[in-house]
Image (cartoon, helix red, strand yellow):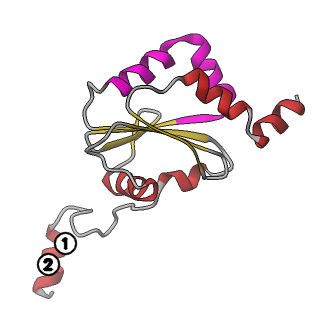
């Protein structure tokens, strides 16, 4: 066995990039959900606190579910989808695709089912009701409501 092969076997998975998933997780959401992406440099950021507090309210949680939404957070570089870890490669791919820096500024992004960015705001000024209203104006959402 060559020295290089032995070295590669001795390294943990992902240390060489082998086996590391570097796909953008938003690609899997296309035509299925409307992702919200909240990127903050630290867990105590006011934007993250505002989104978490809003989603603790029953009406907001129901509105979130009803609109086929998924919550992606990146806190201090650690990505999650609805609370489940994304892994560093997938988190980095999502940040690259959205042209975001995990170090800040705090940013809120709404992605449509078509994969396009529909709303982008920096800071804690985002209002989830305004986000729901924006979604309700989207053609796919209006079509869905008419079919009910």
The one nearer the camera, 118 or 51, is 118
Which is nearer the eye, 37 or 129?
129
Instruction: Give percent across and percent down for residue 26.
Output: 52, 51
Q: Quadrant of the N terminus?
A: bottom left
What is the magenta range? Answer: 46-70
| Element carrying mark 2 | helix
> Going by the picture, which residue comes out furthest to the left?
3
Is residue 58 inside the magenta stretch?
yes
Q: Which residue is mark 1?
A: 9
Q: Residue furthest right?
A: 147
Classed neighbour count for the residue bearing mark 2: other residues with Cα under 10 Å, few (<14), some (14–19), many (≥20): few
- 76 vs 31, left or right, is left
Q: Is residue 38 left or right of residue 15?
A: right
* Above or below, 31 relative to 109: below
Residue at image point 50% right, 19% down: 55
At 34% across and 62% down in the image, what residue appears? 20
Q: Which mark is residue 34?
A: none
32 is within the stretch colored magenta: no
Secondary structure, magenta segment, majority class? helix
109 left or right, relative to 34? left
Q: Find out whether the residues at labels 2 and 1 contact each other: C-beta distance under 8 Å.
A: yes
Other residues around mark 1 within 10 Å, as few (<14) / some (14–19) / many (≥20): few
Q: Position of residue 136 (x, y in %)?
A: 73, 31
Residue at image mark 2:
6
In the depicted structure, whether residue 83 falls above or below residue 91: above
**Quarter of the image that includes the C terminus:** top right
Residue at x-position 49% and y-position 52%: 25
> Which residue is found at the position 39% from the left and 58% from the top?
96
């Amino acid at each position: 066995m060559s020295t290089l092969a032995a070295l590669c076997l001795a390294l943990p998975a992902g240390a060489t990039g082998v086996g590391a998933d570097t796909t953008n997780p938003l690609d899997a959401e296309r035509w299925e959900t409307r992702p919200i992406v909240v990127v903050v440099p630290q867990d105590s950021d006011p934007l993250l606190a505002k989104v978490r507090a809003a989603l603790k309210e029953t009406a907001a949680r129901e509105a979130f579910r009803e609109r086929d939404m998924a919550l992606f957070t990146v806190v201090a570089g650690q990505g999650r989808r609805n609370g489940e870890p994304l892994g560093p490669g997938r988190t980095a791919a999502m940040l690259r695709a959205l042209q975001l820096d995990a170090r800040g500024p705090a940013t809120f992004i709404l992605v449509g089912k078509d994969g396009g960015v529909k709303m982008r705001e920096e800071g804690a000024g985002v209002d989830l009701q305004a986000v729901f209203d924006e979604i309700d104006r989207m053609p796919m959402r209006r079509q869905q409501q008419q079919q009910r």
